[in-house]
Image (tube, rainbow, N blue to C red):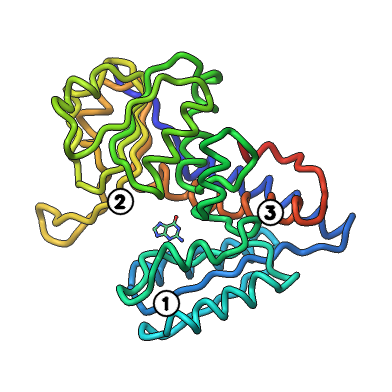
């Protein structure tokens, strides 16, 4: 069997198209232009690439993009003052502070200083609590993108066995909450899980989000299962140079899975599309405009 390839790149382009349509409607009907502020502290090269790409796509869907690049030695007080200013700026509907932050900054404190209704990453403790209790919240972008692809592929996820590998606050934990919300039987596996291969072999849905290159081989995958690969790892190529690979061994997994997301071109593009969808959602909620996008849970 050869797996269906879930084309995240095409799916993300479709989502961005839907966002752009809604943005045009907000402008025409309400005179509103959604605004997304992105804060980058320091000059981590990978983060700079993400931030540039986010800014470009924000503008492409017709939103305002506000970029704040701060020096690596920015004080916590200065960062909190900027966030306070953005919280109170009516032009700004979404705020994203790029992680990781330099070591001298308290990540939890910084994230929890963002107004929850503008927290388009869904990392604020109040959004985490709302998601965990099944209430309307801002949903973290990467797991939201994975859920959209799973729903599109399966229709209903009800009753399926889902195994999430990785327990991060950014992906693993919110992914588990979303799958539970769609009535999957959810297992969260991690580095201390006993007999991980046996756990993964039970799964109808495998979401790999550990950050270890190609750690899931095909013989861990139940034939016909859906594999969502959140990993983005750079490895040395045989003939020199580097290439991007996921957390699953693509070729051996694709040979047994029913469906699989490639790396690159799977989950990655969906994350930014969902960030834009969340910014649209935040703008609608801020202005008491019905959310008709179907782009959130
Ligand atoms: N760094 C890596 N992933 C993310 C993300 O989804 N949001 C933010 N703010 N920083 C990140």
Identify the mark nearer the N-term, 2 or 3: 2
Q: Residues within 10 Å of mark 1 (few under 14, many from 20)?
A: many
Identify the mark nearer the N-term, 3 or 1: 1
Residue 220's place in the image compared with 249, above or below, is above
Residue 69's place in the image compared with 20, above or below, is below
> Mark 2–mark 1 contact, CB under 8 Å?
no
Residue that label 3 marks: 282
Q: Give the x, y percent position of residue 77.
A: 48, 82
Residue 267 is tagged as none
267 left or right of 57 in image: left
Nearer the observer: mark 2 or 1; the answer is 1
Residue that label 2 marks: 232
Residue that label 1 marks: 41
Q: What SS does tag 1 mark?
A: strand
214 left or right of 254 in image: left
Q: Give the quarter of the figure containing the C terminus.
A: top right
> Is 148 in front, or is 252?
148
Residue in view at x 24 percent, y 24 percent: 200
Q: Give the x, y percent position of residue 115.
A: 62, 62
């Amino acid at each position: 069997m050869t797996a269906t390839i879930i084309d995240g790149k095409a799916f993300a382009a479709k989502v961005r198209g839907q966002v752009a349509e809604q943005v045009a409607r907000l402008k025409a009907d309400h005179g509103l232009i959604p605004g997304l502020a992105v804060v980058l502290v320091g000059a981590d090269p990978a983060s700079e690439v993400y931030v540039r790409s986010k800014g470009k796509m924000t503008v492409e869907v017709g939103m305002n993009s506000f970029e704040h690049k701060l020096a690596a030695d920015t004080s916590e007080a200065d960062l909190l003052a900027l966030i306070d200013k953005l919280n109170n700026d009516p032009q700004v509907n979404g705020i994203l502070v790029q992680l990781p932050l330099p070591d001298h900054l308290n990540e939890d404190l910084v994230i929890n200083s963002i107004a929850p209704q503008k927290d388009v990453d869904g990392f604020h403790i109040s959004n985490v609590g709302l998601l965990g209790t099944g209430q309307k919240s801002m949903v973290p972008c990467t797991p939201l993108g994975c859920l959209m692809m799973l729903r599109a592929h399966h229709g209903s996820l009800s009753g399926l066995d889902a195994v999430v590998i990785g327990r991060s606050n950014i992906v693993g934990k919110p992914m588990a909450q979303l799958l539970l919300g769609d009535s999957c039987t959810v297992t969260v596996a991690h580095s201390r899980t006993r007999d991980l291969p046996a756990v993964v072999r039970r799964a109808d849905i495998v979401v790999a989000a550990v950050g270890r290159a190609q750690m899931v081989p095909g013989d861990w995958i139940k034939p016909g299962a859906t594999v969502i690969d959140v990993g983005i790892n750079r490895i040395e190529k045989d003939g020199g140079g580097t290439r991007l690979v996921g957390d699953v061994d693509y070729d051996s997994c694709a040979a047994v899975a029913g469906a699989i997301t490639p790396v690159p071109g799977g989950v990655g593009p969906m994350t930014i599309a969902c960030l834009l969808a969340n910014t649209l959602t935040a703008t609608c909620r801020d202005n008491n405009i019905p959310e008709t996008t179907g782009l959130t849970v």
